Amino acid sequence: MTARVVSPARGPLVGEVRPPGDKSISHRALLLGAVAHGTTVARGLLDAADVRSTAACLRALGVDLRWTGGEAVVTGGDLRRPEGPLDCGNSGTTMRLLTGLLAGRPLVATLVGDASLLRRPMRRVADPLRRMGATVDLSPDGTAPVHVRGGALTGIDFEAPLASAQVKSAVLLAGLSARGTTRVREPSRSRDHTERLLRAMGVRLEEADGWLVLPGGQRPRARELDVPADPSSAAFLLAAGLLVPGSRVAARGVTVNPTRVGLVEALAAMRAEVACEPEGDDVEPTATLRVTPPAGDLQAATLAGGLVVRAIDEVPVLALLAAFACGTTAIRDAAELRHKESDRLALVAAGLRLLGVDVTEHPDGLDVVGDPDRVLRGGVTLATGGDHRLAMTFGVAALRADGPVTLDDGACVAVSYPGFWEDLATLQGG
Ligand code: S3P
């Protein structure tokens, strides 16, 4: 844990940044590449701790994976039994998707992770995979270590109890090697990167009556892929651009996949426009996103339902923005945030309170009392829980404080955005 002191902004933030590659898509490119026919080339892959965890696990499974600069070259083939436990680090996506991928392969593996990952719920993936015929053992609390004994699977109809792209993806990845058809339906549409990439790699995956329908016994075909920039990383730069008067900030090359742009929708509800200039559309639509602080005040809004699913990783920074809105913002249907890399609702509430914001915590959300003219309290030390997205949220908050703010861990941004502090400094002309 390395503490970091962040100073208030001395002037506007101005400039264009290309945030790093999308984390979700980077994991999927490696995982699908590992079982595809042929050699997959993924450019612009996120070089950060979480994706490195996926790469290391795949290598331990015998995958030929070369990764230099921003380009990964993965040759698909049979996975072999790993010699030791597969270390997923801090990455829930690695653990859940890999469990799904292994469930239908003839090998035994144990998946472990860091202290945060060992606390996160895994029954949500174990249950449907067991129904498909895999043996998946967890701790009595339903957490990792995850012991998977893969084998012959049978397709199931899976009505997911919660909207989770990780759970949906685990079942689809298992369904690739199942006998018969796997169908998945979720209560609200979570990010669809797995579906897009499967189709782009030649896999037949249809949609009917709200069900995803995947005939089993399919193998993806390798391809070249450009990984777009991550909107969840862009969110922190855009929030900084909205909060610091006079700023003009743009994030280039970002995926604007409709299942990922909850931030833009939420900001529109709060009367802050994000200008979206389309760039391309290959597997994922991409755009440059531009912000300037809104002419009028930000307005409080209710952020709930499917919008929260589409902005699931942006809720902490939206709570910060809400602290500068006119009125009280209600965030609801966000109980899942208690099961992320930290209990994000509790830690955001605690951090914002220390900064002087009136926040009420609910089991599934927060009420944040806004004030457009507020100045946050500097001189405080905020607990990040080692959670990358909280460190970045509080780092942006510091820009509007009356003195330096200390984060107990500034280095954890390396999980998803290793160059975050440098990019923030560049926008500040530093
Ligand atoms: C992810 C899905 C989301 C998200 C996480 C990445 C993915 O998690 O919060 O950062 O890549 O599928 P859940 O599926 O648990 O909602």
Image (spheres, grey):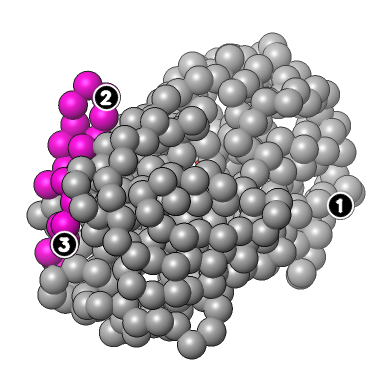
- Residue at the spot of label 3: 219
> Disc 2 to disc 3, how far (Cα)?
24 Å
Is residue 218 found inside the magenta-colored segment of the image? yes
Q: Earlier in the sequence, mark 1 or mark 2?
A: 2
- Residue 381 badge: 1
**Residue numbers of the magenta segment:** 204-223
- Residue 42 badge: none
Instruction: Identify the main secondary structure in magenta.
Output: loop
Displayed quadrant of residue 331:
top right
Work out whether residue 236 or residue 37 is closer to the camera in this orientation and state it. 37
Mark 2 element type? loop
> Disc 1 to disc 2, how far (Cα)?
46 Å
Mark 3 element type? loop
Residue drawn at 68 percent across, 39 percent down: 338
Quadrant placement of the N terminus: bottom right
Q: Is residue 282 visible?
A: no
Confirm if mark 3 falls within 8 A of ligand 1: no
Is residue 170 found inside the magenta-colored segment of the image? no
Residue sitting at the far bottom: 83
Q: Earlier in the sequence, mark 3 or mark 1?
A: 3
Give, as a three-letter code, the residue at label 3: Arg
Give how far across and how far down residue 163 sits, in percent: 46, 33
Give how far across and how far down residue 126 sits, in percent: 50, 51
Judge left or right: residue 315 versus residue 175: right
Judge left or right: residue 348 versus residue 12: right
Give, as a three-letter code, the residue at label 2: Gly
Residue drawn at 39 percent across, 66 percent down: 150
**In the rendered image of this protein, does residue 31 appear above or below residue 279?**
below
**In the rendered image of this protein, does residue 285 appear above or below residue 320?**
below
